[in-house]
Amino acid sequence: MKPIRLSLHAELRRGKRGASRSEVEEAVRLGVREPAKLGKVLCRRNFEYNSVWQGRHFAIKQVAPVIAEEDDEIVVVTVYVFYF
């Protein structure tokens, strides 16, 4: 598979929203893919969380990076994180 590069925006959002770099990479490689705006692809992957985020307990953390496939790499444009 192609190497994965996080844009500066994606790196900042990843940290702010509570996802690790390894979770983002796993979501890109193994997550369920669906079409996103402007020809991009959204990759979703659920992770067992069982922890507290912003004062509330959640069992699942879903990491959902948006990617652009380039000829020689996969560029992560942004990262969404959902807690359940």
Image: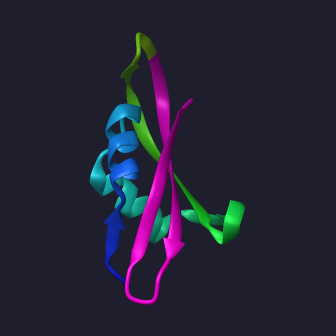
Tell whether 74 sits left or right of 21. right
Whether 52 is drawn above or below 10: the answer is above
Task: Please report the residue visible at 35 percent of the width from the left and 53 percent of the height from the top.
Answer: 23
Coordinates of residue 70 in the picture (x, y in percent): 47, 82
Whether 68 is drawn above or below 17: the answer is below
Quadrant in which the N terminus appears: bottom left
**Residue 14 visible somewhere in the drawing:** yes
Coordinates of residue 24 in the picture (x, y in percent): 38, 55
**What is the chief secondary structure element of the magenta stretch?**
strand
Q: Which of 58/42 is in front?
A: 42
Q: Magenta region: which residues?
A: 57-84
Q: Which of 46/3 is in front?
A: 3
Whether 17 is drawn above or below 2: the answer is above
Task: Please report the residue visible at 70 percent of the width from the left and 60 percent of the height from the top.
Answer: 37
Task: Please report the residue visible at 38 percent of the width from the left and 81 percent of the height from the top.
Answer: 73
Tell whether 74 sits left or right of 67. left
Q: How many marks?
A: 0
**Residue 36 visible somewhere in the drawing:** no
Coordinates of residue 45 in the picture (x, y in percent): 51, 54
Tell whether 12 sits left or right of 48. left
- Inspect the magenta stretch and tell me whether residue 60 lies in it: yes
Q: Quick one: which residue is furthest to the top in this view?
A: 55
- Inspect the magenta stretch and tell me whether residue 70 lies in it: yes
Task: Please report the residue visible at 48 percent of the width from the left and 29 percent of the height from the top.
Answer: 59
Coordinates of residue 10 in the picture (x, y in percent): 40, 51
Quadrant in which the C terminus appears: top right
Q: Quick one: which residue is furthest to the bottom in this view?
A: 71
Q: Which of 48/24 is in front?
A: 24
Q: Quadrant of residue 19?
A: top left
